[in-house]
Image (cartoon, rainbow, N blue to C red):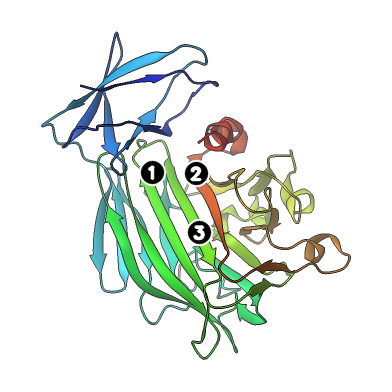
Amino acid sequence: MPTIELNPAYDISQPTPVRVAVMGLPQGKLLLQPEGSGPALPAQADGENALVFIANNLKAGQPLRYRIETTLAETVGVRLQQDQGKLELHLPEGHCTTYHFGPDVIRPYLWPLYGPGQKRVTRSYPMAEQAGETQDHPHHTSLWTAFDEVNGVNNWASEGKHGYTRHQDFVQQEQGPVFGGFTARSIWTDSTDTPILNETRVVRLFNIGAQGRILDYTITLAADYAAVEFGDTKEGGIIAIRVATSMDGARGGLIKNAEGGRGEKECWGQRATWCDYSGPVEGETLGIAVLDHPSNHNHPPRWHARDYGLMTANPLSNAAFIGGNPTPATLQPGQSWTFYYRVLLHRGNADAAGIKKAYQAFAND
């Protein structure tokens, strides 16, 4: 059986997805058996020559070797369930989120989003009404991707004359003991459904246990029709989140970024490698962190983070946040940008959840 050796350059002190290249992976259900003491780890093939598993409690500079074995044991992991216009993602703990993509959807989105303890950490409006929730900004649909001023088209708003993100198909769906998710193709259009650009969205949910949730969210935008100009506007998020109303900064929640900024005043419009929004949810503090990978275009992004509950990563605008002359971002014909994010749903605030350490692991992925 093949073996792998891990020699982390940094401590891994919380459940973290690890992907390693392996030639000649055996077929079937896989298990990593340590050469020495320690528990066996469920593993999952990622294509023909890569393996993904969840690592924890690894010390920098202390190499570990594992044998890759096959197993007949059934391991409950991430499960998908598709219905008309929606695709559900389930963990052993329960429903995590649903991807909504039907023909009546202006832009695909993930809702609801359940954090630890199966508690909702994003707002339900406008998809549903919940007692005590705010009902502003009906284009804020839980977790989504949108941008204003795309070749002059408003693909951010949901009222008036606006553009659309039209789901086309699923390239891939996968489920297993370690991760599950999908790859979806969409077209950004103007208000008459004339294509502007192509989008590929990859969402991957990891089975890290009941203490948290990890979602990897990758967006590729491709100028397959003509050049695409993104206006210099604050109204946009390659990844955008509207937190549960009880978490709002205006109600006792906290926005915090990688630079130590706290609250809207110190985080809005600032560049940072990550941003976190935490606050009270059903009797405890829960949070959502978004991590921006160093390979992303214009890394690190500026953050459109508001005390009323909005947090978006906007790598394509500058003057809209700090003043000066607008500097639109242009995708030339045939060019594409890929943006890779990790979303952490966690207990406690950013410090208690160890977001700084989680980012170190993500940045080296």
In the image, taking residue 30 as reference, residue 199 lies left or right, namely right
Of residues 55 and 282, the one drawn nearer to the viewer in this rendering:
55
Distance in Å between CA atoms under marks 1 and 2: 14 Å
Q: Residue at x 40, y 74 (%)?
A: 167
Q: Which mark is residue 344?
A: 2
Image depth: mark 1 or mark 3 in front: 3
Answer whether residue 122 is visible to the viewer in this image.
no
Tell me where residue 354 sits by quadrant.
top right
Q: Residue at x 50, y 47 (%)?
A: 343
In the image, taking residue 4 as reference, residue 294 lies left or right, namely right
> Which of the marked residues, 1 or 2, is nearer the chain's N terminus?
1
Helix, strand or loop at disc 3?
strand
Above/below status of 276 relative to 25: below
Answer whether residue 304 is visible to the viewer in this image.
yes
Q: Which mark is residue 219?
A: 3
> Which of the marked residues, 1 or 3, is nearer the chain's N terminus?
1
Q: Amino acid at mark 2?
A: Leu
Q: Position of residue 85 (x, y in %)?
A: 31, 73
Of residues 227 and 52, the one drawn nearer to the viewer in this rendering:
227
Helix, strand or loop at disc 1?
helix
Q: Which mark is residue 117?
A: 1
Residue located farthest toward the left when viewing the structure as drawn: 72
Distance in Å between CA atoms under marks 3 and 2: 17 Å
On the rendered image, what quadrant is the N terminus found in?
Answer: top left
Q: Position of residue 73 (x, y in %)?
A: 13, 31
Image depth: mark 1 or mark 2 in front: 2
Of residues 204 and 208, the one drawn nearer to the viewer in this rendering:
204
